[in-house]
Image: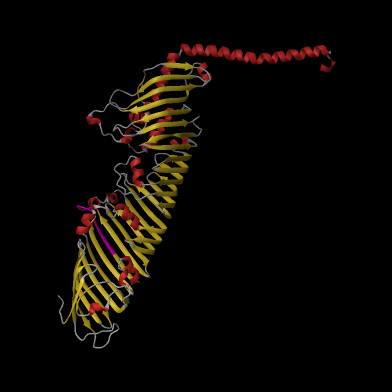
Amino acid sequence: MAEDMPTGERHATRRGRIALLALIPALVLAVIAAAWIAGASSFSLNAAGAQADLEARLSELTGEPVIVDGTAQFSLLPSPLLTLSSVRIGADDGGPILRIEGVQAEFDLLDALLGRTDIGRLILLRPSLAYPEAAPEQAGTSPGAATAASPPASAEADGAGEAGPGNPALDFARDLLGRFEGIRSVELREGTFRPKDGSLGITNVALRLDWPARDAPAELAGSFVWRGEPTEIAFRARTPAAFLEGGASELSLSLSAPPLRASFAGTGTGGERLGLDGQLSLSVPSPTRAATWLGRETSRLPDIGPMSLDTRIRLEGSEMTLPSAQVGLGEQRGQGALEMSFDKEGRPTLSGTLAFPRLDFDRFAQAVAPYPRHALDYQRPIPVAFIGDFDLDLRLSATEGGFSGLPLQQFAATLKFARGQGLLDIGDAELLGGRAQARLSLDLTGARPFGRGRIELAGVDAAGLAGLLDLGTLGLSGRASLTADVAAPITNWTNILREGEVASRLSVSQGQIAGFSPRLAEAGQSTLRLETDAAPVPFSSIEARLRSRGPYVNLEGLSVENAAGRIEATGFFSVLDDQLFVTGTFRPQEEGESEAGFTPSQEIGFRMQGEWPNPTVIVADGERPI
């Protein structure tokens, strides 16, 4: 048909279509312009109503009265925006006041043209939450009571934060998000929230909450400075509405600050009992620093250095299981299964098993009671009160480790805290070719903390034991057994050294001892000097019993027996001035030559006195023990 039309008519028809297409955009622009003019006029006529609607919405969000001391400005393009300046939220009743330099509310263009003021995005510029000048009797509020902005005020007003049969935190979150429902995005810029006690609180707050629709994911991300530490946070809930109503939702959380790094990824349920199932990761350079940063200024945890935890977590209300826990204590890493629960008073209980390639108990002992470095350290209190803050029941094992300077291998141990009493029980361990057991208890229920300990060694290498006791120059060999019982008040090092008691018994069999010159056995007076090139003297047994209180050591009995005879002695030693006083006798076995080259025919008495390590030795034939 078109081909049958004359050429001129076809050109005219084509020009008509082009002209019509060109008119369509112009008509659309005209309609938009007309709508804009009509909408702007309508919004201008209802500006006071829009401001009132926004103030009412802010009051609904915070649960507090809203006062605008500044101006209200509106712009339609590029998107409808209502800005209020100098906004105050809060009653003049001594409670916190939230001051906001500017509140920006963005609306949907169509809603604005139709005269509706439903908020699509809310921006709070430089919000600052602070208490008015507090009266003396009002000071001292817990810092955690005012670390959030308007939400805590609303929660307090509506009772959402009160303890009850449900979960207070979830009740608060449910109430908060219920208030914000319909606002697709809320943003805080340069926020500052000061606690009532005047501490640092939260500053430099830059947070954004995006929740496009009730059935859409919700995301919170941003940064702030909490107690002087820069912090970044990111949270995402796949189905937040279902979560808050007790259903399940995918959850992810990331928190990063110098005192603490934490992350979680998994699922959660938000009924009356919070439920979580996913992967948890925590790391702190210092548990003490982290506890203080989290607001636990009264935390009594010792600073045991870096700690980390990577595990799957299953949480159901107050019961928590960590079936695949990997625990880091500095460079020491263990793995096992842990459980934690909280009683009605909020007291935690931790139990489970952990296995380590290496576990050094001395590292923790030094964190609690480091050795004094100067005079003031002797009087510094030893912080052991943390034992009463929680209950603990751990089964530990390690390939190697240390306890009280002893290099243990292949050992198992139990660590328990229960209502102010602590116990470390190392049931069995390999040590220097023999066996070792140790037990340390601490009781906080008395007038002052008191500790008791016991070490038992059996069949260990005597040379290795002498080295551990800093007696390596004696050149001791053989197999040794040792028991030592210790008791002392664990208050400070002064009281430990002054009042501590030690009772020990040492036995060594079938060995040699070197370092003593044969001239010491000659009658007369000489000075004890250990000689590394002295010939070793064999012995069949050495038995020693010592008891000390404070700096004073009693040698209750010493016997050394070999083929030549038997030495028996008693004595006294003062750690304060290194003064030694020992008396004893040597009783020969029989007449004749001995392995040492001499065997007198009668008993020899001797006395050793003076300053260690070079006391005077006096030997006299026929002299009885002094």
Q: Quadrant of residue 501?
A: bottom left
Q: Which residues are magenta?
A: 444-454
Nearer-the-camera pick, 510 or 429: 510
Residue 611, x across and y down, in percent = 21, 67
Q: Is residue 302 above or below residue 535?
A: above
Question: Within the magenta stretch, is there residue 451?
Answer: yes
> In this figure, what is the number of numbered marks?
0
Residue found at the very far bottom of the displayed protein: 592
Residue 187, x across and y down, in percent = 45, 28
Q: Is residue 86 left or right of residue 10?
A: left
Q: Is residue 344 left or right of residue 257?
A: left
Colouring scheme, one of rainbow, by chain, secondary structure, one colour:
secondary structure
Q: Is residue 212 left or right of residue 228?
A: right
> Which residue is at a point 75% across and 13% down the rendered structure image?
15
Residue 593, x across and y down, in percent = 27, 87
Question: Within the magenta stretch, is there residue 263?
Answer: no
Q: Is residue 446 above or below residue 530?
A: above
Q: Quadrant of residue 167?
A: top left
> Which residue is at a point 38% across and 17% down the rendered structure image?
70
Q: Quadrant of the C terminus?
A: bottom left
- Note whether residue 1 is visible: no
Q: Quadrant of the N terminus?
A: top right
Q: Quadrant of residue 586?
A: bottom left
Q: Is residue 286 above or below residue 515?
A: above
- Note whether residue 379 is visible: yes
Q: Is residue 302 above or below residue 254?
A: below
Residue 17, x across and y down, in percent = 73, 15
> Which residue is at a point 82% across and 11% down the rendered structure image?
8
